[in-house]
Image: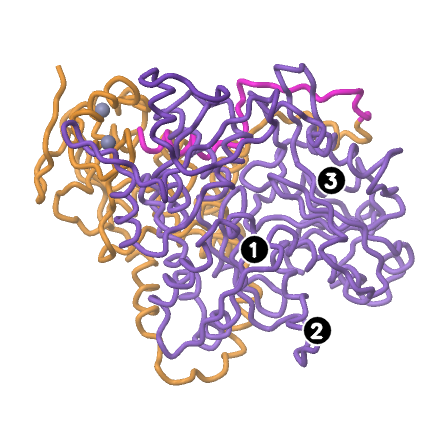
Amino acid sequence: MPHVEVLPNSAAHIAPGWTYVVDTGYDPSKVALNPKNKKRAAAQPRVPRGENELSSRQQLAIARRIAELNRDNDPSKSIEIPGKAAVPKTQNARRIIQYQRQIKHWLDDEEAQLAQLQQAPQPRAAAAASRLATAPSRRSSTMALIPPTASEATTPGPALPAPAPAPPKPRNERDDERLLSIDASMPSSVNPAELQALLSAPPLSYAASHASLPPVDGPPRRHFCDNCGYWGKIKCMKCGAKVCGLECKDAHEATRCLKWA
Amino acid sequence: MPPKGSKKASAAAPSQTLVLDNGAYTLKAGLVSANGAELSYDDCAVIPNCIARSTRDKRTYVASELEHCKDFGELAFRRPVEKGFIVNWEAEKAIWEHEFMGAGEGLRCDPSDTNLLLTEKPNCPKELQKNCDEIVFEQFEFAAYYRCIGPALNAYHPFSASSLFSLPQECLLIIDTSYSDTTILPIYNGTLLQTASRRLTVGGKLLTNYLKELSSLRHYNMMEETYLLNEIKEAVSFVVPSAQQFATDLERTWKGRQGDKRELDSSIVVDYVLPDYERAIHGHARPHDPAQLRMRRGLQPLQGPREDLLPLGNERFAVPELLFNPADIGIQESGLSGAIMEALSVLPDALKMGMLANVVVVGGNSLIAGFMERLETDLRALVPAQYLLNVSRADDPIKHTWLGAARFASQPERLRDVLVTKAEYDERGSTWLGKKFTTM
Ligand SMILES: [Zn+2]
Ligand SMILES: [Zn+2]
């Protein structure tokens, strides 16, 4: 039995479950499976409930699809290297050449190490952590809350308790203020200490290097027909995707509905 | 910097350097002598960085061998670089050996008598950097080595032939929109300003995969046709100049609804003639012909040779639009121009102005029709009116970073300052080396 609902302009229908905005900026598949950081979700001003809000199931579906679109290699297809390989010359080389890990494993390791440094009690480690973490924490709040497991996600229960109290103001708000404060006059030369700090700052972690969410006051997200790519005007009640009309609704249900759920 | 006059640093360094921009999609490579000679894009070879396997002719193609492939149908790829970083050394080693070492034609070197200048993407996990350094010295045994953020070396391009400016360029904002992702890299005197660098998830790979997904959903199953869809993307994509034009073009490519069918606008909609790998290895696009579609559906008798057509309408502009509106498919990042402003917001005003006055775009996505115009329009709307905004695309956006690196490597005094010799590595190890390259 098809369920079709024409979207009201001001919002009302929310699927059961959570309503935080998903942030898929980093590796979405990883974020979906390891909800480590709830700061951004908690700190996000509560936008009035509207069509921007997605159910956890939809969030997970989006994250999975983006991970799929962003994949470099298909682990299910192995291609043997032709010919006889040169022998590894050292133990290090042998170990490295034999790794069958994918990039997500290395990035997971990096995040785990940063988290460990931040928690380490020893003063030396703590100093190292703060040095390493100042920049990365800029973005550590961008991994929004996603339900921990797929099974939980596909059977959303009653609403969860509210997330932990709001952490310090997210960095990007400050950035926005600075952005607006660009002075009309020619700026004076750069403060040498400030320049030195910029030049010698360590790199951000990979996760921390991603751009932030679009500004809240920017243009609203556009929605497209899941089937033909025209404007999405009708919402599929099974999966939350949008379609443009009845014809595409039928096609959607026959093809992609719940594909990434 | 290594101590000046250090015996080990200066004694052993050979005079030729393999300059290698090790991209996920292609390697850009060339041998450069440290004699300050003029260099050009022609000194750079572009080599697929993959091992491909065809289930049809049962052949495996390593890197440049792909040029002998005559049937790209269902071709599967193994890529050693993921998200821009070298992850699989088994495959990368095989490709390097195949392309640069041993007997054979073309670009050949003996690592023990060659320096390696290897570029990497920003924000590479340390463990992967360490793996790379260990392989370079312990497996390949290069005589000396420098690993650095490739795009930063674009500061070593002269402004113009008769330039009064000294190098490196003082303020340079590189937008690198490549296969793996898109990065925004403010560079000061050749040094990347790390805390002001930003990354967008969308790159050429994601665009190709998105087009593959849409075409498979709407027309044929093409999920195994990555090569073809990349070719189609390069042939038909364009970036709309504005959000208004996006809406207009979306109307022109809409089929209408039941009972109110519209004629597709054949000034936008194209039919891509798919290659059959017998008469043609490559396909081509031509204006959409509704009669062809009716013939294919059996509504009209077939005329002329049998052809498989892939109609492309809103896919032509909705796919590359993700660079400017990643939220269109739910990626929670601002678009390119917003991310550029976010990156610059970290900098003091004087640097911000300097960067905006010298924006250079590199990477293959910048070749999509309309990309540069859209970037400039979007940026102009965000940059304060009194700021000078200069946005240009490198003459060859694929090879430009390589050429910057090659120009750097052609100057003996610059190279001497950064190279680490194998003897130094053997003495001090990879942890020391990792720290050295990070702080240099
Ligand atoms: Zn539709
Ligand atoms: Zn659905």
Q: CA distance from mark 2 to mark 3?
A: 40 Å
Q: Is residue A186 above or below residue B265?
A: below
The kind of secondary structure element at disc 2 is loop
The kind of residue tagged 1 is: Val
The amino acid pointed to by label 2 is Ala
What's the amino acid at mark 3? Glu
Point 49% across, 29% down: residue: B273
Query: What residue is pinned by disc 1?
Result: B362
Q: Quadrant of the C terminus of chain A?
A: top left
- Chain identity for the colour purple used in the image: B
Identify the chain of the residue marked 2, using the numbered disc in the image: B
Q: Please say if the residues under marks 1 and 3 sit with CB atoms less than 8 Å apart.
A: no
Q: Which mark is residue B134?
A: 3
Element under disc 3: helix
Q: Residues within 10 Å of mark 3 (few under 14, many from 20)?
A: many
Q: Is residue A120 magenta?
A: no
The residue located at (79%, 61%) in the rendering is B410
